[in-house]
Amino acid sequence: MTFIRTLCALALCVTTSKSLAAVELPSIGDNSAGLISPSVEYALGRKALRQYRAYFPQAQDPYFEAYLDSLLDNMVVHSGLPDKPLSLLVIDDMSLNAFAAPGGIVGVNTGTFLMAQTEQQLASILAHELAHLSQRHYARRVAYQKSKAPLNWATMLGSILIMAAGEADAGIVAMTAAQAQQMSSSLAFSRDMEREADRVGLDTMINAGYDPHAMPQMFEQLLRASRYRAKVPEFLLTHPVTESRISDAKNRSQNYPKRHYPSDENFQILKARAILRHESSTQFAVKRFTNELNGISLSPLTARYGLVTALIESRRTEDALREYEILAKEYGHLLPVRIARADIYAAEDRLDLAIDILKRELAITPTNHILNVRYAEILMQASRYELGQSVLTEHVKRHPENAYVWYLLAETHGLAGHILEVHKARAEYFILLGIYEKAEIQLRNALKLTEDTKYEKPRLEQRLAYVRKLQNEKL
C-alpha cells in the first residue's frame, strides 16, 4: 500500500500550469531536464494498475465500462496523448472521484455519475484527468521534488546545527519555518499544475465537440456540494476547487458562444444504474424512481429506466414489463432499453426468449461488450455452458484485461467440467487483481493436470515465472 500512497501523492493530487517564480518547470518530454523517461513512467503506472485492482473494489458492470471507454476514446484523440490504449478502472464507490496515473490509467468512481448532471459535465472531469497525463504531471512533480531536495536538506541541516550549538528554541523555529516553506512551495506547484490541467482539459473538450461551459458549471456544483456536506468529496481533496479556478474556467469558456447540447441518453441510463447501485435497497430505489417519474430532479429516461431495472432486481416482473412498455415506446432505439426486455425474461426464467433477443442484437453488433457479457451470463443461467465458453473465449481476446470476463469464463469452464481451463482462467483473473499467491496456486494446479506437451506446459511454466516476478516486485 505504500507504493499506492506515494503514487497518489505524486501523481493523482497534481494541479496546473502558471510558471512558478521559485522554479522553472522542466519542458514536457525533456528527460535531460530531470523528468523520468516515458518508459519508466509507463512501467510505474502498470505496477500501480495491478495494485489499484487489488485494493479498490471494481464495479464489474459492462455498461459503465462500455460507456466510459467510448467517451474516453472520443476525447483522447484530441488530448495530445500518444496513440496508446488507456486502462480504465471503474471503482465501485458512491463518492465523486476520478484520477489519472502514469501508464495511461484513468479511474472513475461510479458515484461520479451521481454528481454530474450531464455528459458534458462528466466530460469536463475526464478531460481534466487526461490533461494530467498529457502534460506528464507525475514526472514533472518528481523532477520538482528532486530539484528542491538539496535545498530542503541543507535548510533542515542548518536548523539541526543551530540546535546543536545550544540554541534549541531558535533551531526548532528554523526547522518549523523550513517545513512550512517546503509545504507552501509544494502546494503552489500543485495548484499551478491543477490550473494547467483545467486549461489543457478545456481545449480537449472544445476539440472533441463538448461544451466548454460545462467545466465551470461542474466546478461550481462541486463547490456548492462541499459547503453542505460534513465529508468533503474525495475529488476535492486531490483537486481543490477555488473561486480563482472557477473564474479562470469561466473566462476561458467565454471565448466560445453558448449553444444547446442535446442530453446524452446513454449518460442518463448510466445515471440510473449508478443510483440503483448505491441506493440502500431495491425497495427504496423503486420508491425513488417512482417519485421521479414527474421529473423532480431526474430526466424521464433516467427515472423510467431506473424504475424498470429496480423492479427487475426486486423480481416484480409484471410491474417491470408494464413500465418497460412505456419506456420502449419512446426509447426503444437504445440498446440498454432493448436489453432490459431480455433481463425481464431472464428474471422470469423464460431464458430462451432472453437468449433470442440477445442473439438478434449480437447479429448486428457481434463485438459489443455489454451484449457479450449479458449473453454469457444468461447462457450460464440456462446451463448452456459449451456455448457460453465459446462466446467468452472469443470475447476475452478483445478484453484481455477485463477481470470480470475472466471470472465468467472460469465459472463457465467449471460448470462445463473443464477443470484445467478453470485453473488457467482463474489464474488470469487473480493476476489482474494483483492477488499473486492465488494466481500461483491456480497455475500450479493447472500444471499438475497438463500433459507434457510441446506447447501447453512451457506456456504455463512461463506464466508461473511471470507471476513470481510480480510477487517479488510487490511492495
Image (cartoon, rainbow, N blue to C red):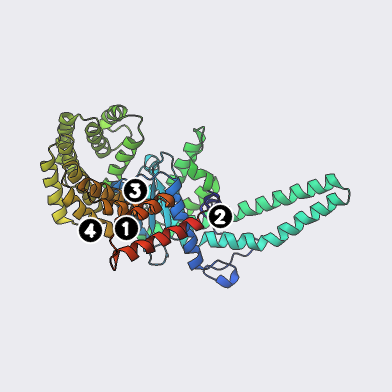
Residues 10 and 298: in front is 10
Q: CA distance from mark 4 to mark 2?
A: 39 Å
Query: Which amino acid is tagged 2?
Result: Leu
**Which residue carries the number 3 mark?**
119
Disc 1: CA contacts within 10 A as few (<14), some (14-19) or many (>=20): few
Front of the two marks 4 and 2? 4
Q: CA distance from mark 2 to mark 1?
A: 29 Å
Q: Position of residue 472 (x, y in %)?
A: 50, 57
In the image: residue 344, left or right of residue 43: left
Query: Which amino acid is tagged 4?
Result: Glu
State whether residue 352 is above or below residue 83.
Answer: above
Q: Earlier in the sequence, mark 2 or mark 3?
A: 2
Element type where label 2 sits in the image:
helix
Residues 326 and 183: in front is 183
In the image: residue 313, left or right of residue 426: left
Q: Earlier in the sequence, mark 2 or mark 1?
A: 2
Disc 4: CA contacts within 10 A as few (<14), some (14-19) or many (>=20): few
Query: Which amino acid is tagged 3?
Result: Glu
Q: Earlier in the sequence, mark 4 or mark 3?
A: 3
**Which residue carries the number 1 mark?**
400
**Which residue carries the number 2 mark?**
10
**Which residue carries the number 4 mark?**
394
